[in-house]
Image (spheres, rainbow, N blue to C red):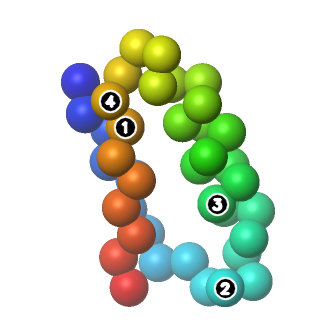
Amino acid sequence: MLLIYTGSYPDDKCGVGDYVYNLNQEIKKNYTVNVVKLS
């Protein structure tokens, strides 16, 4: 299963990176996760 997170995040939204990182830590045990940021 492949999960792709896409979006455009302003620099002041530092919480988004932390959220995605923590989410990946939980999911990576069972899934392959690619985080893609599109500007």
Q: Earlier in the sequence, mark 2 or mark 4?
A: 2
What residue would you read off at disc 1? 33
Distance between the Cα atoms at labels 2 and 1?
22 Å
The residue labelled by disc 4 is 32
Query: Element at badge 2?
Result: loop
Residue contact at pointers 1 and 4, CB within 8 angstroms: yes
Give the residue type at disc 4. Thr
Q: Which disc, if any, is residue 17? A: 3
Mark 2 crowdedness (10 Å alpha carbons): few <14, some 14-19, many ≥20: few
Along the polypeptide, which appears first: circle 2 or circle 3? 2
Q: What is the x, y in percent for residue 11?
A: 67, 85
Dot 2 or dot 1, earlier in sequence: 2
Identify the mark nearer the N-term, 3 or 4.
3
> Residue 25's quadrant in the figure?
top right
Find residue 11 and name its label: 2
Callout 4 crowding tier (Cα within 10 Å): few <14, some 14–19, many ≥20: few
Along the horizontal axis of the image, is 12 left or right of 29? right
Image coords of residue 22 (percent x, y):
67, 39
Q: Amino acid at mark 2?
A: Asp
Q: Amino acid at mark 3?
A: Gly
